[in-house]
Amino acid sequence: MEHKLEFAQRLRHAMEAAGLEPRPGVLLNVFNAHYWGRSVSFQAASRWLRGEAIPAQDKLLVLAEVLKVEPEVLRFGQAVRHRVEEHRQRWDAGAGYQEREVFDAFLSLPAPQRKLVREIVMALAQVHAKPKG
């Protein structure tokens, strides 16, 4: 339930930032003018704004586009974006050319060989992670 309320708060803030009044009627009109599928009801827009429901992914993408925010930020908040960025930076900093070459070769292997390589790497990682002493 908390995720729905947090989404509703982000949706209201995004509407205000876009110069829109955070009301169901306003959201309904703006959304339905841009959505290619079956239009949403006043009740659906109300539930989104009250934190009773989170729209499906296709609707979320339209909302994000209309409100000019990133879909993942609208759905999950800025914290998720920061975590993704941290992981990306770790990947960029930790993997050089040789590692990327190995990853590409690994991905080109058939599934049985990938499974074997994974098992070997995981076994080595387990041995390395054991405390010494």
Image (cartoon, rainbow, N blue to C red):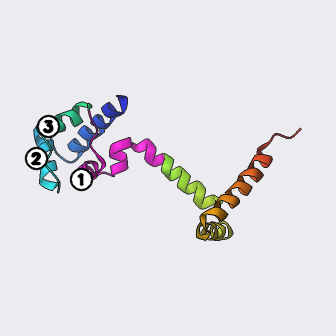
Under mark 1, the amino acid is Val
Circle 1 residues within 10 Å: few <14, some 14–19, many ≥20: some
x, y percent for residue 61: 28, 52
Under mark 3, the amino acid is Pro
**Image quarter of residue 9:** top left
**Which residue is tagged 3?**
24
Point out the stretch of residues depicted in magenta. Answer: 53-82
* Residue 22 in view (yes/no): no
Which quadrant would the N terminus be assigned to in this image? top left
Furthest residue in direction right, as rendered? 133
Going from N to C along the chain, the mark reached first, 2 or 1, is 2
**Image quarter of residue 8:** top left
Q: Quick check: 3 above or below 96?
A: above
Circle 3 residues within 10 Å: few <14, some 14–19, many ≥20: some
x, y percent for residue 97: 65, 70
- The residue closer to the viewer here, 80 or 129, is 129
Label 2 and label 1: CA atoms lie apart by: 13 Å
Residue 29: assigned label: 2
Going from N to C along the chain, the mark reached first, 3 or 2, is 3
Label 3 and label 2: CA atoms lie apart by: 9 Å
Q: Secondary structure at mark 2?
A: helix
Magenta stretch encompasses residue 81: yes
Circle 2 residues within 10 Å: few <14, some 14–19, many ≥20: some
Q: Could you tell me which residue is drawn at 36 percent across and 46 percent down?
A: 73
Magenta segment main secondary structure: helix
Kindly check if marks 1 and 3 are in contact, taking CB atoms under 8 A apart as contact: no
